[in-house]
Image: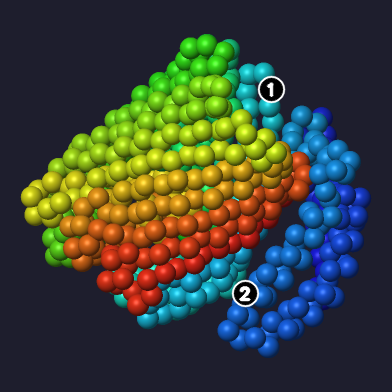
Amino acid sequence: MIESTLQLKVERSDSTFRLSQDSIVCLMTERLDARYTLAKLLLPVLQDFSLLASQMPIKKTFFHLLAFLLLSAAPALSQTSDGPPQQQPLQVGTVTFSGSIRERVEFWDWFGGKGENNYAFSGTLAQFALSQTSSSIDWKVDFAAPFLLGLPNKAVVPAPQGQLGLGGSYYASNSSNRFAAMIFPKEAYVRFKSEHTRTQIGRFEFGEGAEGKASNTTLSALKRDRIGQRLIGTFGFTDIQRSFDGANMAFAEGPWTVTAVGAVPTRGVYQVDGWGWVKTPFAYLSATREVTHSSSNSAEWRLFGIYYQDFRNVLKTDNRSAAARAADTGEIRIGTYGGHYIQAIETRSGTVDLLAWGALQSGAWGSLAQRSGAAALEGGLQPHFANKVRPWFRGGYYYGSGDGNSKDGTHGTFFAILPTPRVYARYPFFNEMDNCDAFGEMILRPSKSTTVRIDGHHLSLASAKDLWYTGGGAFQPWTFGYQGRPSNGKSDLANLYDASLDYALNRVSSIGFYFGYAQGGDVIKAIYQHADSPFGFIELNYRF
């Protein structure tokens, strides 16, 4: 057994401090010893479990990774939410040292294919940050270290089957390596503050739609889960994610928030090297206002505009022939204009919520004119009955336009820009491009620490003459960022049924489970030999 200890000593003078490696001490020994007691007790059991798994060749990888994840979970599991108060982050004078570790094991059984469609792999994202806050200025330097272990090496096959799940995407994006790791600055910014303004300069995270702080809890949840990051986001589900280099300015006074951002996305998402840029800059401007009609009736609206440019000389993903796409080396320049409206109304039956979101696009898709649009309408009810589980029932419909004619000089596919797709596609085999999504969901909240969510989706293509799109935008200089598979003249994509359980172990750690099952429709059946596909993961989060 290999044992390692992470130790740290901080030496500080009046004006400077440094982290000294040669004179190391463990800052968190007392906190870790008690919690690792359970890990030591579990180790013999898990070793026997792993030995048994090695005799089961079909699911050997699954059991090895599950044993590894359970062992890693032991320290967090042993510190329950009923324990003593958590210690505060380490302070060195006025400088705060903080961080987080996210560990996930994913289990894939893609729709089939000529390669490796059934596999499991592990992804870990560790972050360590130094920050300082004052009344007029903040700064933060946050380093990320992603680790990808056991990626499938046969999950990338020729078109139209392509990458057989995200394991294939990670493998293809990291020079065909099964194991990949890197460390890079995820955030490095200075933020200047005054009474009404915040100006952030450097490398930062940003998700459109989250501007302003809704005072109503229902509106806050809608902004987080059904509005935010539809078009620009960090792609937070992936093990590397993305950040933005540029400037972010916000003005807030009363119910108003005005936000302006100009930035370039970093590399990352599937590629562990997140140091450089992707030459796809954007400018974003929005105005958000919260409206309080009465103590039982709150609402919020936002208007926004986005200008996006892609001047990389890479092959675009659209429904034209390969020859036509190869000949089109023109830039992408797209303006997106839209808004949202959300409302929460307290009634005798419960809290009713309404949501409307929409966007139109114009500009140039290389040599083609861009003309596209998307819209979402949703509603929900949090009834007063079953208070022990506090249910929330929601449903809605999303439409993202597709292109109906590949030869008419117009690109009619709604372009999702740089989103976080998994917010709206929890099993990420689709996105918001050329997509129609009719869904219903039930959320149960039996305690403050537990959330259960069950969804059902009927998915179809908006245009049977367009493609089935996946992906979440540019993340490398040499690949487009979206993939497309032929529809073969079909529009029925899939039915998706999924469920998740999220449990907060305490104030610093949580565990999550997800399982989704996709019943492939005519589009998928025309490409893969298996119509159905399950996908799941187990995830642990710890922050300090």
User: Are dots 1 and 2 in contact, CB under 8 Å?
Assistant: no
Assess disc 1: are there few (<14), some (14-19) or many (≥20) residues with their C-alpha within 10 Å of its C-alpha.
few
Instruction: Tell me the quadrant of the picture where the C terminus can be found.
Output: top right
Q: Nearer the viewer, residue 414 or 217?
A: 217
Q: Quadrant of residue 86?
A: top right
- Say which residue appears at 57% left-offset and 43% top-offset: 443
Q: Position of residue 4 (x, y in %)?
A: 81, 65
Q: Amino acid at mark 2?
A: Phe
Q: Position of residue 411 (x, y in %)?
A: 17, 47
- Residue 228: in sight, yes or no? no
- Say which residue appears at 49% left-offset and 67% top-offset: 534
Q: Amino acid at mark 1?
A: Ser
Q: Nearer the viewer, residue 352 or 474?
A: 352
Q: Which mark is residue 519?
A: none
Residue wearing tag 2: 62
Q: Position of residue 338 (x, y in %)?
A: 31, 30
Residue wearing tag 1: 134
